[in-house]
Image (cartoon, helix red, strand yellow):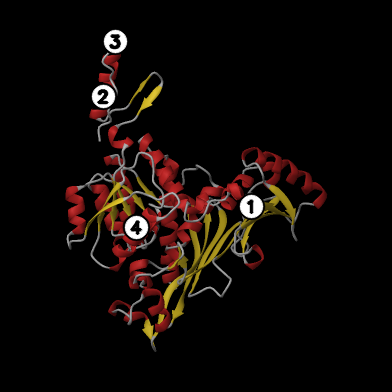
C-alpha cells in the first residue's frame, strides 16, 4: 500500500522536490534517512500475513493483538475441516470481545490445492505456520523457496531428516534474503528473564558450573496436560496430535522451549556451532496411556482413527509424549525432560522446574503447589559459600537488578531468598505470543536477523532430534 504524503499547494519547490523524492522511494521499496528520520520501505512497513493450515491454537494466539504496520487482512490457506473452523472461531472471539477488540479480516481458501494456491498467489509476505508437524518442515521449505518470510510454531523439525531439511532451508532463506523464525514465548516469561539477568552477575552468581551426568549444571523440567482450558474454553485437540509421527514425540516437541531457554539464558547472543558445541550423552522416552473416553473428551472424536491403531492395545492408546535428554553444551552438562499427563487434578496446573548452578549462587525456578502453580525464582547459596559471605553478594546483586527491573523485593525462603515480582512486570502466557510477533517485526523492519539467533535455532533442533535418535537407538 502506497502511503500518501501531504504536499501543500503553497509549499516551496524545494520542499515539493524533497517530498517527491520520499514518495518515489516509498514506491520503489527503498530505505533512506531524511532529516535524521528513517523512512521504511513499503514492503517492510506493511506486513501482510498468510496463515497456513492453522491446526494448533497458537496460530490464533498470534492474532490476539493488532500490530502497527501489519495489514488487518489475513489470507488463510488450509484444508476444510474442524481445525480451520476452530482457528476462525478464536479470531471471531478476539474481534468481538468488549475490551480491546481486534479487527482482523480473514480471507479463507480451503480447496484441496491450498498449498499450491498459496505458493502461486502469494497474497502476503509473512507465512504463519502452526499445525501438523509432519508437514511443517516441508511447508517451511516451500514457503522460503517461494521467497516468503516465515514465522513458525515449534517444533520446526521432529526428526533427523527434518533437521537436515531445515538446515538447507536456513541456507535458502539467507540466499533469498527472507527471515525464518520460530515462536519462543518462554523468553518473555519474567522469571526466565530474571534468571538470565542474575546469571550474568559474576559477583553474585559466579561462574556456571560444569556439572556431571548425574548432577547437571543446568536442569529444565516441565509437566503438561492434554486436556486444558485456553482463553476460557476447553481445548479440543485434533486426533493427529496423539500420533507422534505427525505431532512429534515429546522429546522433540515441548523440549524445544527448554533447550532454547538453556541456550538463551546461559549463552546470551553467542553463536553456537552445533557440530562442535553439542554432545548428546543419553536420552530416553516413554508413553502416556490414554483411554478411549479420554481421547473422545479431548478430540470430540467417537473412535480412534486408523493411523493410531499401531499405538493401541486393549483399547488403550500409548502416546510417546515423554522424554529426557542429557547432553553437554560447550562442555557443560544439561538435562531437559518433559512429561505429559491427561488432566490436572482439581486446583492444579502445569509445573516447571529449572536450576542453573553457579559457583556462588544457584538460580532456581519452581512452579508447584507451594507456588500456586505460578513460576517463582529463588536465590540459593552454593554449597561452598558461607551465609555471612553470601548475604552481601545478594544485596549488591539485587541493587543492580532493580536498576533495570524496579519493584523487585526479596522474601526469606527455606533455602535462601524468593524474588517477589510486581504484577506490572508479569506478562500473561497468551500475551507472550504478541511479544514474539513484535520481535519478529523488528527483525523484518531491520531487514536482518542476528547470526546468533539463526545458530541458536540450528543448535536447538540438532539437540532435540539428536536426543530422539539416541532414545530410539536403545
The answer to whether one can see residue 156 in this image is no
| Picture coordinates of residue 390, whole percent (x, y) | 77, 48
> Residue under circle 3?
12
The answer to whether one can see residue 455 in this image is yes
Judged left or right of residue 447, residue 231 is right
Say the numbered circle drawn on residue 92.
4
| Picture coordinates of residue 193, whole percent (x, y) | 57, 48
Alpha carbons under labels 2 and 3: distance apart: 16 Å
Alpha carbons under labels 1 and 2: distance apart: 57 Å
Q: Are marks 2 and 3 in contact (CB under 8 Å)?
A: no
Judged left or right of residue 128, residue 100 is right
Mark 2 or mark 4: which comes first in sequence? 2
> Residue under circle 2?
23
Judged left or right of residue 180, residue 435 is right
**Residue 392 quadrant:** top right
Mark 1 or mark 2: which comes first in sequence? 2
Q: Quadrant of the C terminus?
A: bottom left
Task: Compare residues 170 and 128 and report the one nearer the observer.
Answer: 128
* Nearest to viewer (mark 2 / mark 4): 4
Q: Residue at the location (18% across, 63% down)?
A: 112
Amino acid at each position: 500500500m502506497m502511503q500518501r504524503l501531504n504536499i501543500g499547494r503553497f509549499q516551496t519547490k524545494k520542499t515539493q522536490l524533497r517530498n517527491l523524492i520520499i514518495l518515489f522511494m516509498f514506491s520503489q521499496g527503498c530505505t533512506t534517512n531524511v532529516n535524521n528520520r528513517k523512512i521504511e520501505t513499503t514492503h517492510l512497513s506493511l506486513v501482510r500475513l498468510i496463515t497456513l493450515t492453522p491446526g494448533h491454537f497458537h496460530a490464533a494466539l498470534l492474532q490476539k493483538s493488532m500490530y502497527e504496520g501489519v495489514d488487518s487482512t489475513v489470507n488463510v490457506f488450509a484444508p476444510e475441516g474442524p481445525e480451520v473452523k476452530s482457528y476462525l472461531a478464536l479470531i471471531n472471539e478476539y474481534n468481538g470481545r468488549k475490551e480491546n477488540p481486534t479487527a482482523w479480516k480473514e480471507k479463507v481458501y480451503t480447496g484441496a490445492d491450498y498449498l499450491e494456491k498459496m505458493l502461486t498467489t502469494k497474497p502476503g509476505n509473512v507465512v504463519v505456520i502452526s499445525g501438523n508437524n509432519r508437514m511443517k518442515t516441508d511447508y517451511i521449505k516451500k514457503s522460503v523457496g517461494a521467497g516468503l518470510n516465515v514465522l513458525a510454531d515449534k517444533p520446526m523439525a521432529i526428526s533427523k531428516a527434518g533437521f537436515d531439511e531445515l538446515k538447507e532451508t536456513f541456507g535458502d532463506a539467507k540466499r533469498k534474503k527472507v527471515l525464518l523464525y520460530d515462536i519462543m514465548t518462554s523468553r518473555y516469561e519474567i522469571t526466565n528473564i530474571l534468571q538470565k539477568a542474575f546469571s550474568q552477575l559474576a559477583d553474585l552468581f559466579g561462574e556456571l558450573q560444569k556439572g556431571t551426568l548425574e548432577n547437571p549444571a543446568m536442569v529444565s523440567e516441565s509437566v503438561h496436560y492434554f486436556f486444558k482450558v485456553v482463553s476460557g474454553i476447553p481445548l479440543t485437540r485434533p486426533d493427529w496430535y496423539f500420533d507422534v509421527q505427525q505431532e512429534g514425540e515429546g522429546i522433540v516437541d515441548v523440549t524445544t522451549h527448554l533447550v532454547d531457554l538453556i541456550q538463551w539464558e546461559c549463552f546470551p547472543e553467542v553463536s553456537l556451532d552445533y557440530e562442535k558445541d553439542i554432545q548428546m550423552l543419553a536420552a530416553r522416552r516413554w508413553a502416556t496411556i490414554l483411554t478411549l473416553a479420554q481421547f473422545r473428551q479431548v478430540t470430540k472424536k467417537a473412535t480412534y482413527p486408523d493411523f493410531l491403531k499401531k499405538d493401541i492395545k486393549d483399547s488403550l492408546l500409548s502416546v510417546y509424549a515423554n522424554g529426557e535428554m542429557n547432553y553437554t553444551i560447550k562442555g557443560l552438562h544439561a538435562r531437559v525432560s518433559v512429561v505429559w499427563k491427561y488432566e490436572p487434578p482439581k486446583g492444579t496446573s502445569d509445573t516447571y522446574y529449572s536450576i542453573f548452578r553457579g559457583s556462588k549462587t544457584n538460580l532456581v525456578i519452581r512452579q508447584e503447589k507451594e507456588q500456586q502453580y505460578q513460576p517463582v525464582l529463588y536465590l540459593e547459596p552454593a554449597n561452598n559459600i558461607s551465609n555471612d559471605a553470601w548475604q552481601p553478594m545478594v544485596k549488591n546483586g539485587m541493587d543492580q537488578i532493580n536498576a533495570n527491573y524496579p519493584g523487585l523485593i526479596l522474601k526469606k525462603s527455606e533455602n535462601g531468598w524468593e524474588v517477589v515480582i510486581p504484577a506490572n512486570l508479569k506478562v500473561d502466557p497468551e500475551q507472550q505470543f504478541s511479544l514474539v510477533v513484535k520481535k519478529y517485526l523488528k527483525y523484518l523492519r531491520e531487514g536482518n536477523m542476528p547470526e546468533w539467533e539463526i545458530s541458536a535455532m540450528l543448535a536447538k533442533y540438532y539437540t532435540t532430534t539428536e536426543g530422539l535418535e539416541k532414545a530410539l537407538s536403545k
